[in-house]
Amino acid sequence: METKILLTEKEMSTHWYNIQADLPEPLPPLLHPGTKEPTILPPPLFAAALNEQEFSKERWIEIPDEVQEIYKLWRPTPLYRAYRLEKALDTPAHIFYKYEGVSPAGSHKLNTAVAQAYYNKKEGIKRIATETGAGQWGSALSLGCQYFGMELKVYMVKVSYQQKPYRRIMMETWGAKCVASPSQDTAIGRKILAENPNHTGSLGIAISEAIEDAFSRDDTHYSLGSVLNHVLMHQTVIGLETQKQMEKVDVYPDIIIGCVGGGSNFAGMFLPFVKDKISGKHSKLEIIAVEPEACPTVTKGPLAWDYGDVAGMAPIAFMHTLGHSFEPPPVHAGGLRYHGMAPIVSHVVKLGLVKARAVKQLATFEAAIQFARTEGIIPAPEPAHAISVVIDEALKCKKEGKKKNILLALSGHGHFDLGAYEQYLSGKLVDYEYPEEMVARALRDLPQVKR
Ligand SMILES: Cc1ncc(COP(=O)(O)O)c(C=O)c1O
């Protein structure tokens, strides 16, 4: 088997896969934050086409030609066989990884950024407001908007804005305006800064600022880089390509492993496969979602109704949550510091189709270094969580003398996270324990929903 399993542009997916067509139980509705009745996404914030995709039950949704043309700049992405990591681990397991870091923005986020910019542009929208954690989403949407000649304002979580200036410069290079959140540019930002001028920010706050911005202008829509159904669906190009690539070498995965922040990269990988688990074709397939011990949304958070943002302006979703007012410790995997989890991911966990594990920060960097020293790619801190579990599973195969096929969703590179690597290599990086009391406090703020 070759090291790289490649597809041609002609073999790219022409459609996104919509899991809602195949779920054994339908998803719970989204609720209006005020009335708490079922709602669509707020029309002043979202393109109608995206709203339609959010609730569609059609199995396949065509990828517009303009989006496919742009996808060709980096898609199909390579699937690798991790021969060198396998050798270093001395494992009988075969490890495969699908690498989304080859996109110009360095991660999977561009797959939905291009689609969202396209649909907004088509409906006459000139400007988009969004939030970003580590800067991956903000930089991807900056490029997505640039491809379609749109303006973008990014509210970037302050701790990342300070830790990762290069991501801001990337956004500016692609024409976006980026401010640290909480900012002085919105009422919610000013309120939070008045209470605590040194607030380091959170994704929930940045989302509230971007929503407020978009509500306040007719020419502006809001865009979310994860969590929502349509975002996860845009990412299914990852899993659909991987299926074709694995078929080429006549392999089906035994275990699929990925990291979850809001859930989009991993869902993009596993949703096309979970269909085989639902249908019974591959009922033994294991799917493991990995999250930080410091922000353990699925492993420790209840499945409950909660707001998507801190200010309670976003719709209420039924999801695993640590409480919308929870502020996660500043782990370097900024993209995994979100209080909630995609309703689709929460739902498939409830149905027993997907399991979750939490990993501590130091273990993720240890795994990332081993990956970098064998395979060469320096992973982003987010997928380093998944790598840590891949290594655990490969070592378990060794102990039990089992040859399993392990598939890793490698969502992006860590070239802008070298500050975190430096801290790890110089022994300064720390673990954060599960902040139990803070979570208990935040869970008291869950909205009261009678359903
Ligand atoms: C490289 C990378 N992987 C994973 C994530 C987590 O987000 P999601 O769960 O939506 O894929 C992020 C978020 O910023 C990211 O940048």
Image (cartoon, rainbow, N blue to C red):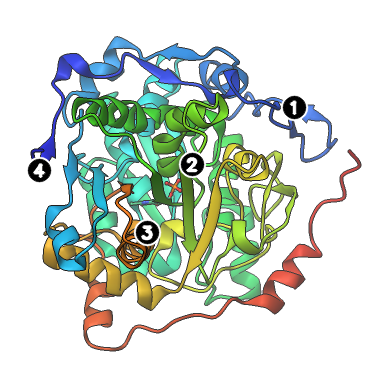
Q: What's the residue at 37%, 60% (across, down)?
A: 393
Is ligand 1 less than 8 Å from the beta carbon at label 2? yes
First in sequence, mark 3 or 4: give its number. 4
The answer to whether residue 325 is left or right of residue 45 is right
Report helix, strand or loop for mark 2.
Answer: loop
* Residue drawn at 60 percent across, 15 percent down: 57
| Residue 410 makes an appearance in the image | no
Q: Is residue 345 above or below residue 150?
A: below
Residues at marks 2 and 3 touching, judged by CB atoms closer than 8 Å = no
- Rate crowding at label 3 as few (under 14), some (14 to 19) or many (20 or more) other CA atoms within 10 Å: many
Instruction: Point out the image quarter for the C terminus.
Output: top right
Q: Nearer the viewer, mark 3 or mark 4?
A: 4
* Element marked by disc 1: strand
Mark number displayed over residue 3: 4
Position in image of residue 152 (x %, y %) = 38, 38
Q: Work out how far the residue at label 2 is from the one at label 4, CA to CA, in angstroms.
A: 31 Å
Residue drawn at 28 percent across, 10 percent down? 65
Question: Quarter of the image containing the N terminus?
Answer: top left
Please give the residue where the numbered disc 2 appears in the rendered image: 226
Q: Residue furthest left?
A: 2
Determine which quarter of the picture holds residue 270: top left
| Kind of residue sitting beneath label 1 | Thr
Three-letter code for the amino acid on which mark 4 is drawn:
Thr
Q: Earlier in the sequence, mark 1 or mark 2?
A: 1
| Helix, strand or loop under label 4 | loop
The alpha-carbon separation of the residues under discs 1 and 4 comes to 47 Å
Is any atom of residue 281 visible in this view?
Answer: yes
Q: Residue furthest bottom?
A: 427
